[in-house]
Amino acid sequence: MKIGFIGLGIMGKPMAKNLLKAGYSIVAYDIVPEAVKELVQAGAEQGESSADVASKSDIIITMLPNSPHVKEVVLGKNGVLEGAKSGTILVDMSSIAPLASKEISEKLAEKGVVMLDAPVSGGEPKAIDGTLSIMVGGPEDVFKKVEDILKKMGASVVHIGEIGSGNITKLANQIIVALNIAAMSEAMVLATKAGVDPEKVFEAIRGGLAGSTVLNAKVPLVLQRNFKPGFRIELHIKDLMNALETGHEIGVPLPLTSQVMETMQALKVDGKAKDDHGGLIQYYEKLAKIEVKKQS
Ligand code: NAD
């Protein structure tokens, strides 16, 4: 069995490497040749295009930025649909609009290709460790066929429901993460401007009800002024846009999400779109004219 892997960025590269380590044969492709070279050095076969990868694979995994990229790679010229044979499974692990997952899967079905949407949570460190949380939509029998492969990349692999439900779950995840980062930012700016050491605040509250994975992951980075991504603000803007559009389509107002979206837009205007999303704190710091950092 051969697995095609398309999209070797911050997340895709370590995920594909974990599959190689687990003994799977991989054919890899990205529009960035250096990324492909790195995978070839780790033992993968070089793919020449998405169609080439599809023609050589039984299962194809895509890990791309957003819906337009997945549509281009799967349905576009020299894309997966051109190369894939009937019976091939496409597992799109990108975080994209749930409606786009449905549209792509319908087009693929015309050629007998089946699709799962399987976005992930956990970021680069968990992609490297192979401990991502993976949320999967699509037919259950297809999920069963790829479950073991997904478990080589994730510590938690949950089948949610029909195609698109993986990405609905991911949108819920991204709303919670964004709002948590915003809450952490407001609180840490308040504490710092009041003259209290933010590191002590973190130490004191992390074990209580305010404690969270977001707090544990982001406060230490903020204290070091480390906003290297990780997960770029521009990607979180993309996820919140997909959440807002989906909410509007199905009749769910998202007032808090829309507020955090605008703070992220302000940072983008300020040239910080490529910062880690923990860099959201810089918006609140600018309003309060204070910087949250390690004090000793
Ligand atoms: P990234 O921008 O680092 O990687 C995307 C890769 O896709 C790049 O290497 C790019 O060259 C490649 N690509 C783009 N268009 C292509 C095409 N037409 N053909 C072939 N390759 C193409 O992004 P990332 O951080 O790896 O994120 C990927 C997905 O995972 C996104 O949907 C993101 O929202 C999601 N995600 C990211 C994180 C994170 O912490 N970075 C966490 C969870 C989920």
Image (spheres, helix red, strand yellow):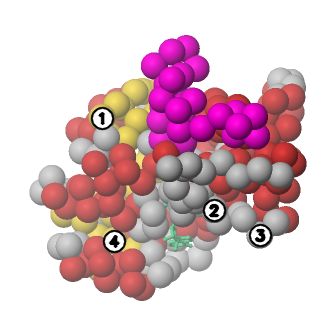
Residue 286 appears in view: yes
Q: Residues within 10 Å of mark 3 (few under 14, many from 20)?
A: few
Q: Position of residue 136 (x, y in %)?
A: 46, 34
Which of the pair 166/154 is nearer the observer?
A: 154
Which of the pair 204/208 is nearer the observer?
A: 204
Estimate the spatial distance between the alpha carbons at disc 3 and disc 2, rounded to whole Å: 9 Å
Residue 280 appears in view: no
Residue position marked by numbered label 4 in the rendering: 28
Instruction: Kindly identify which numbered label has been placed on residue 271.
Output: 3
User: Quarter of the image holding residue 33?
Assistant: bottom left
- Mark closer to the chain start, 2 or 1: 1
Query: What residue type is disc 2 on?
Result: Asp
Q: Residues within 10 Å of mark 1 (few under 14, many from 20)?
A: some
Give the extent of the magenta segment. Answer: 191-219
Residue position marked by numbered label 2 in the rendering: 275
- Mark closer to the chain start, 3 or 1: 1
Estimate the spatial distance between the alpha carbons at disc 3 and disc 1, rounded to whole Å: 35 Å
Estimate the spatial distance between the alpha carbons at disc 4 and disc 1, rounded to whole Å: 23 Å
Estimate the spatial distance between the alpha carbons at disc 2 and disc 1, rounded to whole Å: 27 Å
Q: Position of residue 234 (x, y in %)?
A: 69, 59
Residue at screen point 76% across, 40% down: 193
Mark nearer the viewer, 3 or 1 = 3
The answer to whether mark 2 and mark 1 are in CB contact below 8 A is no
Q: Secondary structure at mark 4?
A: strand
Residue at screen point 71% across, 52% down: 291
Which of the pair 198/241 is nearer the observer?
A: 198
Estimate the spatial distance between the alpha carbons at disc 4 and disc 3, rounded to whole Å: 33 Å
User: Quarter of the image holding residue 98?
Assistant: top right
Residue position marked by numbered label 1 in the rendering: 155
The answer to whether mark 3 and mark 1 are in CB contact below 8 A is no
